[in-house]
Image (cartoon, rainbow, N blue to C red):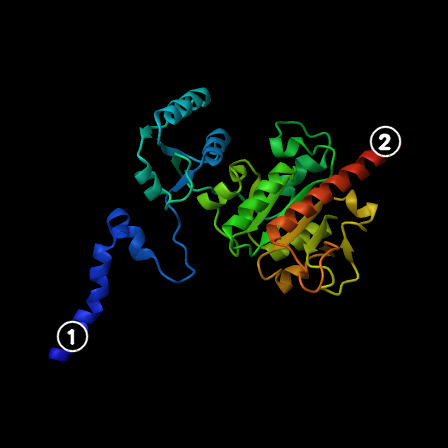
């Protein structure tokens, strides 16, 4: 009996700690659902933080909004003016720094937080569902700012596979939007969730970028190749034996003028079954045996800039000859 009682006390001792833990008092439902498993409970709402993510989210209008929190009266007045211009009726609250820290887990909120619905990109099964406007010069209609910088260049999309670091994913989205990439494709799993951390790391570009979920990435890329899209895997120089391995310095003009999808992998590189769907292996021709690769977000910025610049030059030269 004594043994049973001692075991009972030992088992409930962690529960006693839970009751005393400060996180339990603030978010008890979240605290009990935390575990070491990879399962992620769908978020009911996001707390976007930082000036750029909040402003871009409000202007993009892809989310629904519940409340805006500001640390100072000046910030509150500025955002109320913006809300009036956007004709948005959102409750605003003057809130202390401590509460903002609690809402954002002490991340750099810069005194502004927006409670909003999670971002839910549309799910597509074919590239034609989003690329018709880019493939047809006669297509008319509104064009987002990320598309407006690249009207004369071939369509360029990127597919992210296994990028679990939200900082890397956010940096890739930021570079993509800045460089005029037409859209970002993500699988329904394997990547980091599109959280407020990703939005902050992207400097708010997440709120503006064209982002799509892919139901079946393998089949999707296979269909893209059949429709004459050129699909590139990215890898360190010399890491793969492929007759179609090319660098940005040696890419033939015939590839530069084609619509393209560039596939970026995570910390451990691309999965083998993804590489098999890529007709070409794209490499950066630098490094040595000690440092043979770059952080994926840095590599993405270099590759996308070079590819966009090169494609634009080739396209412009072709048009000038007509």
The residue carrying mark 2 is 320
Image position of 196 (left or right of 294): left
Q: Nearer the viewer, residue 65 or 124?
A: 65
On the image, the x and y values in percent for residue 150 come to 69, 34
Q: Nearer the viewer, residue 276 or 59?
A: 59
Which residue appears at 22% of the width and 62% of the height? 15
The residue carrying mark 1 is 6
Image position of 240 (left or right of 99): right
Q: Nearer the viewer, residue 321 or 15?
A: 15
Residue 91 lies in what quarter of the image? top left
On the image, the x and y values in percent for residue 276 come to 68, 62
As helix, strand or loop, the secondary structure at mark 1 comes to: helix
Question: Which of the numbered marks, if any, corresponds to residue 180?
Answer: none
Name the outermost residue toward the front: 290
As helix, strand or loop, the secondary structure at mark 2 comes to: helix
> Pointers 1 and 2 in contact (CB under 8 A)?
no
| Residue 58 in the image: above or below residue 159 | above
Which residue appears at 78% of the width and 58% of the height? 244
Mark 1–mark 2 Cα distance, whole angstroms, equals 86 Å
Label 2: few (<14), some (14–19) or many (≥20) C-alpha neighbours in 10 Å: few
Label 1: few (<14), some (14–19) or many (≥20) C-alpha neighbours in 10 Å: few
Residue 265 lies in what quarter of the image? bottom right
| Residue 18 in the image: above or below residue 84 | below
Image position of 146 (left or right of 52): right
Quadrant the C terminus occupies: top right
Residue 44 lies in what quarter of the image? top left
Mark nearer the N terminus (1 vs 2): 1
| Residue 77 in the image: above or below residue 55 | above
On the image, the x and y values in percent for residue 287 come to 71, 58
Q: Nearer the viewer, residue 123 or 150?
A: 150
């Amino acid at each position: 009996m004594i043994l049973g009682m001692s075991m009972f006390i030992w088992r409930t001792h962690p529960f006693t700690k839970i009751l005393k833990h400060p996180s339990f008092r603030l978010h008890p439902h979240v605290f009990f659902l935390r575990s070491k498993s990879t399962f992620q409970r769908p978020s009911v709402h996001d707390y976007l933080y930082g000036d750029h993510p909040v402003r871009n989210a409000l202007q993009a209008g892809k989310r629904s909004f519940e409340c805006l929190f500001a640390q100072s009266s000046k910030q509150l007045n500025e955002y109320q003016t913006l809300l009036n211009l956007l004709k948005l009726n959102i409750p605003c609250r003057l809130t202390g720094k401590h509460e903002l820290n609690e809402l954002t887990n002490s991340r750099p909120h810069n005194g502004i937080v927006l409670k909003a619905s999670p971002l839910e990109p549309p799910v597509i099964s074919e590239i034609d569902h989003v690329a018709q406007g880019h493939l047809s010069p006669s297509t008319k209609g509104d064009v987002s700012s990320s598309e407006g910088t690249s009207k004369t260049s071939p369509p360029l999309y990127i597919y992210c596979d296994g990028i679990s670091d939200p900082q890397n994913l956010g940096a890739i989205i930021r570079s993509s939007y800045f460089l005029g990439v037409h859209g970002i494709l993500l699988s329904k799993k394997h990547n980091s969730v599109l959280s407020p951390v990703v939005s902050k790391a992207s400097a708010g570009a997440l709120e503006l970028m064209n982002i799509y979920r892919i139901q079946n990435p393998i089949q999707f890329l296979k269909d893209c190749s059949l429709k004459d899209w050129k699909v590139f895997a990215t890898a360190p120089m010399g890491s793969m034996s492929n007759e179609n391995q090319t660098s940005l310095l040696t890419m033939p003009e015939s590839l530069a003028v084609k619509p393209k999808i560039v596939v970026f992998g995570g910390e451990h590189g691309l999965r083998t079954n993804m590489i098999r769907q890529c007709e070409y292996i794209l490499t950066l021709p630098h490094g040595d045996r000690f440092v043979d690769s770059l952080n994926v977000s840095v590599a993405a910025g270099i590759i996308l800039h070079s590819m966009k610049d090169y494609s634009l030059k080739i396209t412009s030269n072709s048009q000038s000859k007509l």
